[in-house]
Amino acid sequence: MRTIMTSILCLMMFFGVYITQVTAQEEVQEEQAVVEDDSKKPVRSPFEGTLLIENQTFKVQPKGSLELYIHHRFGRFDNGLSDLYGIYAPSNIRLGILYGVTNKLSIGFGTEKNNKMQEFQWKYAIMSQNRGGTIPVFLTYYGNFVIDGNNKDKFGETYKFIHRFSYFNELLVGRKFTEKLTLQCGINFSHFNSVDTLNDHDKMGLNFGGRFKIWNDNSLIFEYNKPLTIKSLSEFSDPNNKGVDNFAIGMEFGTSTHAFQVFLSNWEHIIPQKNYMYNTNALFKKGMLLGFNITVRF
């Protein structure tokens, strides 16, 4: 009887040790799986939001989230103190919404005041820099389709509804270098179905920008945009409008649900293809203006 009891106790001890080892191995495997999965996730907070200043960022908002945008551009500095350097002057505004369809795709709509532009937009994350370092950069495609809501007399005697249409397409590549510094650059193409006399229908451009965190979620933001004059795209030997460079610099103040940006810029049209094609405000001269963007996340 004692031999049987001893055998049973030994057997129980064996199974106890075996189960403990198996459980420990499973826990280790689970921890390794979590670490492995986490390494494949995109890096955290490369930008505070999907908007830099005048440009989009490469960031695409999460699935099911909704963002509300308010863009405001004061008047230019031209009149000096008579209108408090543009603050009392007529301003341009845009209201927009953006919805995350998936974690890679977002769609949105916005309306702009001065040029009565109705903008449908979309953004798709082609690839995202991950925490493990196997994907070193973000690559994002952004595009829009815009309907000009001005009176049809603006489009001449041969007016057709498609003359109101314009398009903008852009590839953005960027990287979060440190917890403080994120940079991006992009190449874009604009097209207008109808243009003013001696203006091209097509325009290409480049942009560069980024943010540097100063404290918490408050950052210095900046960008430089360069319209390009390409002979193969130009319809005239001496295009009337070659476009002007844009430089913008400002501060961004962020929370978990809001981002507020205040900045100095020389672009006032807000809609990207309108800025690249038609803006003529001189850089660092009286064409400069103050602006702000407000983003509210739901």
Image: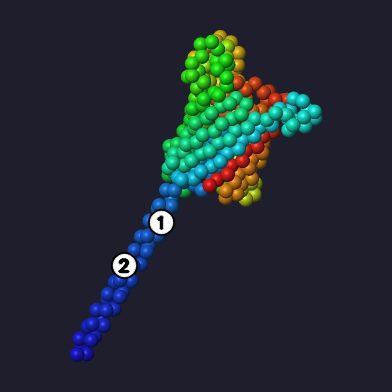
Which percent across, then down, holds residue 151? 57, 19
Q: Residue 159, image x and y in percent?
A: 51, 14
Residue shown at 57% from the left, 15% from the top: 153
Labelled disc at residue 248:
none
The x, y position of residue 75, in whole percent, is: 70, 29
Point out which mark residue 22 bears.
Answer: 2
Residue at image point 62% right, 23% down: 279
| Residue denoted by label 1 | 34
Label 2: state its secondary structure.
helix
Q: Give the class, few, some or many, for how many residues have Cα within 10 Å of label 2's Cα (few <14, many ≥20).
A: few
Position above or below: 90 against 138: above
Residue 14 seen in this snapshot: yes
Front in this rendered view, residue 130 or 134: 130
Q: Quadrant of residue 224?
A: top right
Crowding at mark 1 (Cα within 10 Å: few <14, some 14-19, many 20+): few
Amino acid type of the residue that numbered disc 2 sits on in the rendered structure: Val
Identify the element where label 1 is drawn: helix
